[in-house]
Amino acid sequence: MASVTLSKLRKSYGRMDVIHGVDVEIADGEFVVLVGPSGCGKSTLLRMIAGLESITGGEVLIGDRVVNDLEPKDRDIAMVFQNYALYPHMTVAANMGFSLEHRGTPKAEIAKRVKWAAEILGLDEMLERYPRQLSGGQRQRVAMGRAIVRDPQVFLFDEPLSNLDAKLRVVMRGEIKSLHQRLKTTTVYVTHDQVEAMTMADKIVVLNGGRVEQIGAPLELYDRPANKFVAGFIGSPAMNFIPGQITASGFAADGALLPLPEAAHDLPPRPMLYGIRPEHFALTSEGLAATVELVEPMGSETQVTMRLGGTPVIGAFRERVRAEPGETIRVRPEIASVHLFDSDSGKRAN
Amino acid sequence: MSTVAANGTPAKERKVARKRPFWTMERRDSLAGYLFIAPQLAGIITFVLIPLGLVFWYSMHEWNVLGARFNYVGSRNYEQLLSDPALLEVLGATGIFSAGLVVFNLSLALLLAVLLDQKLKGITVYRTLFFSPVVVSLVAWTIVWRFLLQNNGGINSILLLTGVEGPNWLRNPTTAMISVIVVQVFKNVGLNMVLFLAALQGVPRELYEAARVDGAPRFKQFRRITLPMISPTILLTSIITIVGSLQVFAQIAVLTQGGPGMSTTVLVYYLYQQAFQFHRFGYGSTLSILLFVIVAVLTFVQWQMRRRLVFYER
């Protein structure tokens, strides 16, 4: 196991810069998730760590070794690809033992290591099968098995669950997490799914347009997003943003006066965005009037799309809301969970 | 006692009403299927099965067009085939030609495909260049090569410039066979090259990336990933090339006329000699049947070997 350091890492394709000087410190044994929307550069960053993409500028360190110019095989990493990249003409056992063959590992040792990995992943009955004879989840496990037999210093996962159905994704998410807890190998995991990021990571790196927006523990990102992008990306349904201005009596939005936390009253009056997560609205009898537009019962909660003054917002309530579209309900934002962002820069203001 | 339905209709009448129409959906679908395959079926019957039957029928006759003889001789042509002193030599030449062609053609086609499977500037020009002989007229191509391979032809003239005296390519048994193979390979290698190129481009790039992470060197990537992944195309090209090599005629007729001696007299050329030069159509038909059996057996063997050759058949 080893730490991974990305220092001022840059990547360009011709004149187009796709990674703009990224700095990330990943501690030994840590599970770090790179998350961001499509095209934000998260997979490129992972491939640069793997050695599958050249590095335009900056450094990648695995342990205390600069690995910029090392071939992937010499970096002591193992990677799980989005489409698993299993060799379709090889059995599960051959797939898992392939990397060991090239390291001069004796056959008996390869068989022993493959058996060990197969037992961990529940693949011991499938070693002689071909990938086409496996389900999506089993293939995913083989891809993980191929990675763990090598006992690498770093695991790299490139959106490994994106091809699985929703139910299996939840199962595999748990398996990957428990595998990490068992092996304690440093892991860098790429996903665009913020739920995966929140549930699996020790630390999340939020990327946008080839830049790091924020690095932190999952709940830190949820509770104190550094900017509007992170606030909108982390959490589902996404945070509501209500444009307006701070006044002495509260936050003046279009047709509504929203309550502010005590400390926010000291902020200079300027255009701001009032951020409130859907789950931080409460149904009350004396709150703000909101006109219901859509009610979506989810079972565990009810999501209500409503108009607060002139701004459409979403509220998520534990109660079963039985309002009809056009009806007025009263809601109150939890003052402690209000986030304020600068309208121009999008940076957190409170 | 007659039964009456809830709506008052007697049960017998209801039975009549339920009778299935002749043109059920299943029958209509079947008819559409048969109509779709009918043109192809008619073509196969007219141009494959009937001629095959006729050739088999002719092979049991002594048929001399000039002598206007068409006599039933039963299995005599087949007996003659087994005792034909030239046949072993002909089959030997055919075997050497086929083996040389298949090995040389497939190896060169794969090598070219690997070289041309690069993202380089102007790569399409190179691909077109190597493919272009395929669309050139076979006879024109062979005539040009005959001039090049003559004793005082282009190739020997170039060799002379480097101080080497070239052989009389088409008049020496060994070089004649090599020449015929090379001319045929250069003519058709582009076709297999394109097929290999398509197969190479179909191998997911992620497999090579996984192999790089796994530490497999380039040659091992080719042997352990590329070759198995393109094995269906290797099987296809080898079947096409073997069948094509057994049917070679024009190149031999233009370049060597089967000579020197019988060194390049392959089965189809021998068949042509028997039927059209010696007017022995019956015996020529027997040789056609032999060719059919050889092609059928080889194709069957190759098809059976697909379990070992083609990864997805395992």
Image: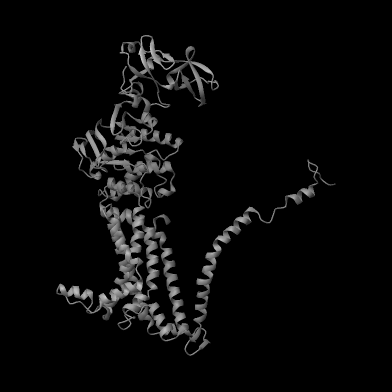
Q: Would residue A26 appear left or right of A333 to someone viewing this image?
A: left
- Which image quadrant is residue A234 in? top left
Q: Residue at x 63, y 53 (%)?
A: B25
The image position of residue A141, as x and y in percent, is 38, 41
Question: In this rendering, is residue B81 above or below A64?
Answer: below
Question: In this rendering, is residue B314 above or below A54?
Answer: below
Specify the farthest residue to the right: B1
Specify the farthest residue to the left: B163
- Which image quadrant is residue A349 in? top left
Q: How is the image coloured?
A: one colour
Quadrant assignment for the C terminus of chain A = top left
Q: Residue at x 44, y 79 (%)?
A: B287
Q: Residue at x 44, y 48 (%)?
A: A133
Q: Would residue B271 appear left or right of A24 to someone viewing this image?
A: right
Q: Residue at x 46, y 35 (%)?
A: A167
Visible in this render: residue A3?
A: no
The image position of residue B9, as x and y in percent, is 80, 45
The image position of residue B308, as x and y in percent, is 39, 60
Counting the numbered discs, the total is: 0
